[in-house]
Image (cartoon, coloured by chain):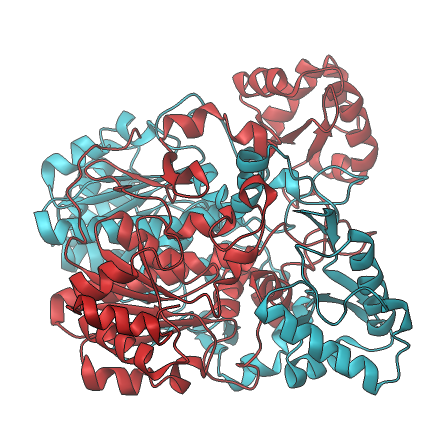
């Protein structure tokens, strides 16, 4: 796999590298821009210390290559003749302008699967629009639904939109691989970040389509249109040392949780008289008056406020209540379940004389387990391996390319 | 790209027993079904898919066949109703498992085991099956039994804590966000396992924790904690590299535009468009560091300016000058977005109770193939007879008897 992506697509080939693919990250001489994205190891801003790069380029090899130069383009053509996949995330039309578009490269290798990741796709009225994370979320309809009513819509404080697109790109690549297994032919996969990021709006779009109703942000609450009126569903509750998320609703799964919470409140001597006549601990969302739902969540809020996140989660696990702590990163990194499941994986970085803890296998497979933990490559770390051994260039040729600034 | 019209289906002949429910699991069967697999959802009115009980409902009337939350991940599939508490129904399920190339479940650890459908049991009747199991936190570990939805996992993964304003409580993302992350990873791994089976004939067991997939989206933040002992926090709409970077009001009610200035050249252009070229020389705003230090003040000036414009007009104006800007689309505007329309992002299918409504494609378009949409999401048990007779060769009398004893509900 040839990976020519920037931060918009780095995760795609990383996922497939985890599954065993040999991925060659093609960087511009001096290293990719994505290496300039922080945070950095020990806060030292340096292209070989980017934790962003470490996380999304693990298990890849790296070569440097300037594809804007004629010699560089020739080398990319040679590489793509031997490749199964090529990933790129340049602005639509850019690769074509270098004669490296799908048509050009598939003419040399009809089995090549060419995956393009872009903000809006390769065609259409927004094709040329610029769209970093915030703008993708805006035009996917998701941003409108997030945030406090008194403030503008708000995004995740970490860019996730292109990680969504990268996940989809890995899926598209594999679907194309299945097509190739049958037909022997590669194809062009066109991933749009906007398109992928519309999925988390799934039910909101359905509300519009079916009931002609626009959902709107309500802080951490959610409006639910039900037969007896709009229920303002509460999800986030303050507790002694932070917040927890509790889901009070109807249906089999939630009823069991409601009952468990009810029993615990009884055991703790909570005064449940305000809930007389609301039906609690039973709750039928189709029948309940919105004001009765309010009473229930108000009392739950009063009760939860007496405990810490940890106490609440312990009880939730023990009793089967649909409650979790709103975890900080600190909480996540100390999560007992992850620890005991052996999720984290330590990877040694010799150059840094350090061992860094990484998120571990993202799936457990019995036959082909994810067991690859090679740290992200240094700039051009595999130039000799790929250029000399794979492409059988001579050392003279390589030094000439270096002088030209191609590698 | 405009999707290809090629209906050659890559999963023609692939047989899938889909025991999944709610969000994450069913999307796998959906993508296989889109590309030609025969996918049979095993459901029951005695324990219906929670999505069937969640709004929005057609005409706002609840009913197991009326939720448009349920329909999205389930078109192009068949549905059989089996009350798995009944041993006769479990016999049928066992035959379905023997028939399948791929099976999936998302009930939470322990449930399939109780019915006798653990992977160990299943490979006795179907040794080369691809069996995927997805749950909140995976099938091992002290909290494996925890039951919840995608929003619980988003909160547990730290995603709620980093969405909102620094001076206010966390609000978290809309919806069951972890579902939309986990189901990407799950599709990847199942598609890879099917490829492996195609090449080697071997199936396998896949255990996917929805929590763990979310953590891979936060990799750099986790590394930052482990290496630098730093905790990511809510930043509102601020960004460490871009400024201005925010969401600003436009003309009318609840109309907003997102603007991201990504470099100094864009900042100068933006100042010109604003009619304030002096800002790019003003020490307060000339440099990125200056703008960050005065970000609140700067944002309030920009908001005064954006208020005078229609959001769509402003997006066109800014983008034509090379500035990243996007209307914050509300669902009704997303519904008529011209770019998504160009991609053929959805098709309308007629559902027996809900009527015509749309189903979207997943986000990739292909030059040589396209998903095949042949029917809306099934009614609960819509294909019970079809599956029993056509797939499992039951006779009319046997089906009648099974129905009488209550196995088929």
The x and y percentages for residue B8 are 14, 42
Q: Is residue B306 visible?
A: yes
Residue at left offset 39%, top offset 59%? B26
Q: Considering depth in this image, is B182 or A65 the residue closer to the camera?
A: B182
Q: Is residue A250 left or right of residue B203?
A: right
Q: Is residue A284 left or right of residue A109?
A: right
Location of residue B75 with respect to A275 vertically, above or below? above
Q: Considering depth in this image, is B5 or A278 the residue closer to the camera?
A: A278
**Chain corresponding to cyan in the figure:** A
Total marks drawn? Answer: 0
Q: Considering depth in this image, is A151 or B116 the residue closer to the camera?
A: B116
Residue at left offset 27%, top offset 32%? B3
Residue at left offset 45%, top offset 44%? A8
Location of residue B283 with respect to A15 vertically, above or below? above
Residue at left offset 34%, top offset 69%? B104
Q: Is residue B283 left or right of residue A315?
A: right
Location of residue B263 with respect to B383 vertically, above or below? above
Q: Quadrant of residue A122?
A: top left
Colour chosen for chain B: red
């Amino acid at each position: 796999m040839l990976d020519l992506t920037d931060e918009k697509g780095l995760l795609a080939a990383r996922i497939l590298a985890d599954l065993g693919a040999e991925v060659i990250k093609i960087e511009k001489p001096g290293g990719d821009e994505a290496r300039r994205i922080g945070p950095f190891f020990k806060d030292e801003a340096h292209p070989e210390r980017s934790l962003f790069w470490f996380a999304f380029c693990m298990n890849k090899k790296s070569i440097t290559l300037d594809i804007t130069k004629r010699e560089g383009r020739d080398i990319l053509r040679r590489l793509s003749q031997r490749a199964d996949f090529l990933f790129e995330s340049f602005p639509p039309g850019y690769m074509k302008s270098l004669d490296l578009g799908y048509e050009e490269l598939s003419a040399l290798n009809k089995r090549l699967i060419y995956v393009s990741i872009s903000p809006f796709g390769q065609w259409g009225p927004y094709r040329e629009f610029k769209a970093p994370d915030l703008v993708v979320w805006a035009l996917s309809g998701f941003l409108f639904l997030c945030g406090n009513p008194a403030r503008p819509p708000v995004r995740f404080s970490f860019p996730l939109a292109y990680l969504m697109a990268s996940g989809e790109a890995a899926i598209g690549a594999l679907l194309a691989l299945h097509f190739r297994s049958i037909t022997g032919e590669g194809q062009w996969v066109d991933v749009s970040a906007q398109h992928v990021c519309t999925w988390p709006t799934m039910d909101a779009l359905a509300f519009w389509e079916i009931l002609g109703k626009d959902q709107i942000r309500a802080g951490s609450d959610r409006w639910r249109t039900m037969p007896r009126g709009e229920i303002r569903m509460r999800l986030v509750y303050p507790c002694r040392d932070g917040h927890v998320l509790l889901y009070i609703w109807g249906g089999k799964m939630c009823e069991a949780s409601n009952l468990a919470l009810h029993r615990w409140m009884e055991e703790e001597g909570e005064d449940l008289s305000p809930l007389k006549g609301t039906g609690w601990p039973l709750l039928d969302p189709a029948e309940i008056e919105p004001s009765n739902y309010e009473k229930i969540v108000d009392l739950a809020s009063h009760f939860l406020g007496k405990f810490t996140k940890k106490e609440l989660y312990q009880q939730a696990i023990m009793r089967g209540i649909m409650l979790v702590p709103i975890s900080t990163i600190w909480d996540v990194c100390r999560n007992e379940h992850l620890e005991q499941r052996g999720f984290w994986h330590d990877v040694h970085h010799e150059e840094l004389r350090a061992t860094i803890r990484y998120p571990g296998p993202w799936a457990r497979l019995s036959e082909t387990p994810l067991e690859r933990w090679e740290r992200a490559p240094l700039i051009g770390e595999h130039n000799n391996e790929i250029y000399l051994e794979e492409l059988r260039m001579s050392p003279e040729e390589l030094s000439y390319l270096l002088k030209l600034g191609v590698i | 790209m405009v999707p290809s019209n090629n209906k050659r289906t890559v999963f023609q002949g692939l047989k899938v027993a889909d025991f999944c429910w709610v969000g994450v699991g069913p999307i796998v069967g959906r993508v296989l079904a889109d590309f030609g697999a025969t996918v049979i959802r095993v459901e029951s009115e005695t324990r219906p898919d929670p999505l069937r009980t969640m709004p929005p409902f057609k005409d706002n009337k609840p009913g197991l066949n009326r939720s448009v939350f349920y329909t999205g991940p389930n078109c192009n599939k068949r549905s059989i109703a089996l009350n798995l508490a009944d041993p006769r129904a479990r016999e049928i399920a066992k035959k379905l498992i023997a028939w399948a190339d791929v099976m999936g479940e998302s009930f939470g650890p322990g449930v399939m085991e109780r019915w006798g459908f653990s992977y160990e049991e299943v490979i006795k009747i179907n040794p080369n099956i691809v069996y995927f199991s997805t749950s909140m936190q995976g099938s091992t570990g002290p909290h494996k039994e925890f039951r919840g939805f995608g929003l619980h996992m988003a909160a547990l993964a730290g995603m709620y804590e980093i969405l909102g304003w620094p001076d206010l409580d966390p609000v978290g993302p809309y919806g069951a966000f972890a579902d939309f992350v986990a189901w990407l990873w799950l599709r990847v791994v199942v598609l890879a396992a099917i490829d492996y089976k195609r090449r080697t004939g071997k199936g396998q067991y896949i255990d996917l924790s929805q929590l763990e997939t979310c953590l891979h989206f936060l990799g750099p933040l986790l590394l930052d904690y482990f290496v630098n002992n730093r905790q990511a926090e809510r930043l509102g709409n601020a960004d460490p590299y871009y400024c201005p970077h925010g969401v600003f009001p436009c003309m009318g009610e609840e109309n907003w535009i997102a603007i991201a200035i990504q470099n100094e050249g864009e900042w100068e252009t933006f100042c010109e468009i604003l009619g304030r070229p002096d800002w790019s020389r003003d020490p307060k705003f000339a440099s990125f560091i200056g703008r960050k230090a005065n970000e609140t003040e700067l944002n309030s000036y920009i908001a005064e300016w954006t208020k005078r414009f229609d959001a769509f007009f402003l997006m066109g104006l800014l983008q034509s000058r090379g500035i990243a800007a996007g209307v914050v689309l509300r669902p009704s505007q997303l519904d008529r977005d011209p770019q998504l329309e160009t991609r053929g992002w959805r098709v309308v299918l007629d559902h027996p109770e809900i009527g015509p409504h749309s189903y979207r494609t997943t986000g990739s378009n292909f030059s040589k193939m396209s998903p095949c949409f042949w029917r809306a999401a099934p009614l609960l048990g819509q294909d019970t007879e079809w599956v029993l007779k056509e797939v499992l060769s039951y006779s009319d009398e046997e089906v009648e008897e099974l129905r009488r004893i209550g196995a088929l509900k």
